[in-house]
Image (cartoon, rainbow, N blue to C red):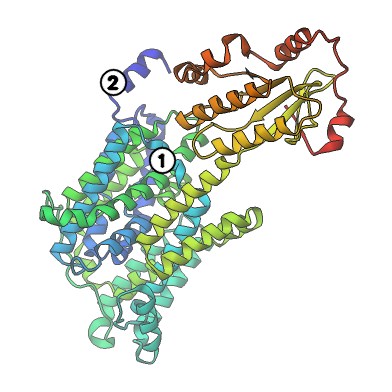
Amino acid sequence: MSKERKKVRRRLPVFQGILPIKRQYIPTEIIAGITLAALGIPEVMGYTKIAGTPIITGLYTLLLPVLVFAIFGASRHLVVGADSATAAIMAAGLAGLATQDTPQYVALAGALAIMAAVFLIIARLIRLAFLANFLAKSVLIGFLTGVGIQVALGQVGGMLGVQTQGSGTLQKFASALQQIPQANIASVIISLVVIVIIIGASMINKRIPGALIAVVGMIIASYAFNFHTNYGVEILGPVPSGLPKLGLPDVQLNELPQLLTTALSIFFVILAQSAATSRAYALRYSEDFDENVDLIGLGLANIAAGLSGTFVVNGSPTKTEIVDSSGGRSQIAQITTAVIVLIVLLFLTAPLAYMPSAVLAAVVFLIGVRLVDVKGMSRIFRLSSVEFVVAAITAVVVVFVGVEQGIVLAIVLSIIDHLRHSYKPFDAVMVPLPSGRWKTMTVEPRNEAAPGLVVYLFGSGLYYANAICFSQEILKLVEGAEPKINWFVLEAAAITNIDFTGADTIQQVHQILQKKGVTLLLSNVADNVQKQLDHYGLTALIGKERFYDNLAEVLEAYQKETNRTPEEPASEENTTSSAPSNEA
């Protein structure tokens, strides 16, 4: 890509997911878009059962939001639309504020989408895309697993054809089980047939639109055999046709504060899930990708959702994979899907009135089952028992307490996990080998680079959470040294940042070492860290002459300083006898 083209893209970050258009791939893109429509339309209609909104709003999520993201997003692959996780968070947040499927509820859902969009755009303006990395993958797997269990349990009543009681998912599930003797046999059969068709189609070929076949087939059967009148099967009833009405949601300003926590939860899920998906596909195809530009696309897509009478949209990993596996390599495929949805809205909504409610319940049930990531959870269990416990706790909270509380817990646990790793980072002392390389050893006073010379490697940025650990390790090395240490070298190659607390700790360490007659030196200091040391006055305090470019220079200077003849470097046998080690 030329410099001129890069400049144009920086000035006008639009159509990045479309341009350049490769004409020879357009037929493939269109086929991928048709495939996404066939698989995605029944799915987004099902998500309305999770969200608690009218079925038509599911189709709206694949119209304007998709077109807006295609124009303003950065990813060529990410598919934006209704998503089970954000729909579940929204439904939990709106519970008690309005009755589901009412105009007031839809208005609050639209306001929530716009509020989440505002957070996304603010995140872009102050470059907070990196926050996506703070929702650990293990925690996200646990969260989505919990959402899947909750979603699946919530559809049992609909599959049985009974009206459930209770405020929470578990209460509704228990109510459904109690009413099994009163189940509508026809609804149960319909649900089972839908499940068999969808699973059977995916086993034959994942590109076969099993959900679409099941939906269309059941609509025809319902119309032909009059399921509602003859068998007491609940059907959707009239579904409005035409384009969505544009306008701000009819919400009072005093209602917005009640949505703030839910909007923040949705913001974090969108940030984590969309960024991870976009990044994975950009890496797969070695493409340019700017997460911050994607935030604008996602924000504007959610504004479009809020203005067009639907609910929050998110980047969907499953829909993105559908397009990719069908040959789609740009947002042209998604635009094709939007055109098909437009045709459905204008001309094909009337038949939806005959769809049995059990069909959507079965579709959503399978969506929930697919979210339960048994393989992912078992892999976490095998590789990291601590992270498995965190993921399992997150899933349990989602199921037994609530989705919104689950995502808040997921964020908190992810941050704690991050702090746990950086609080006690990898550190070591370093000794030279005959080859000239340096080897890392455990932090023990006997592991000296030369008599009286200790080289200490700290493997993290130095900040408030690990500053005490840093000072304690240094004091352990100095106080236990025999013979006495003359030079203490901080190998700073892995230190990427120093905050105020870290700088204050270095100053205190310098004072303690000075009192003990030990000289503090630094090696391999990065340019940005050097500027921070200058800013905090540490360069002047320690002395600029005590900063070295590499450890070889340190060793040479120490030998000259102490008027020593070069000692024979530690052999690999000697260095490995005391503790496990790694070459550096």
Choose between 508 and 204: the one closer to the eye.
508
Mark 1 touching mark 2, by CB under 8 A?
no
Q: Residue 393, relative to residue 158: is it above or below?
A: above
Residue pictured at 57% horizontal, 27% vertical: 495
Q: Quadrant of the C terminus?
A: top right
User: In the rendered image, which quarter is residue 223 located in?
Assistant: bottom left
- Residue 563 in the image: state x and y as whole percent: 81, 7
219 in relation to 261, above or below: below
Residue 464 is situated, as x and y percent measured from the top left of the image, at: 49, 37
Q: Is residue 90 left or right of residue 345?
A: right
At a point 32% along the width and 52% down the height, the residue shown is: 266
- Inspect this view and state whether residue 369 appears: no
Q: Amino acid at mark 2?
A: Arg
Residue ID at (34%, 61%): 88
In the image: residue 119, left or right of residue 513 = left
Locate residue 506, reporting x and y percent.
55, 26
Query: What is the crowding at mark 1: few (fewer than 14 residues within 10 Å), some, or many (at least 20)?
Result: few
Q: Which residue is mark 1?
A: 131
Between 26 and 446, the one nearer to me in the picture? 446
Image quadrant containing the N terminus: top left
Q: Is residue 182 left or right of residue 514?
A: left
Mark 2 Cα within 10 Å, few/some/many (few <14, many 20+)? few
Residue bearing the label numbered 2 = 11
Q: Secondary structure at mark 1?
A: helix
The reply, left or right, for residue 461 in relation to residue 14 is: right
Q: CA distance from mark 1 to mark 2?
A: 25 Å
Q: Amino acid at mark 1?
A: Leu
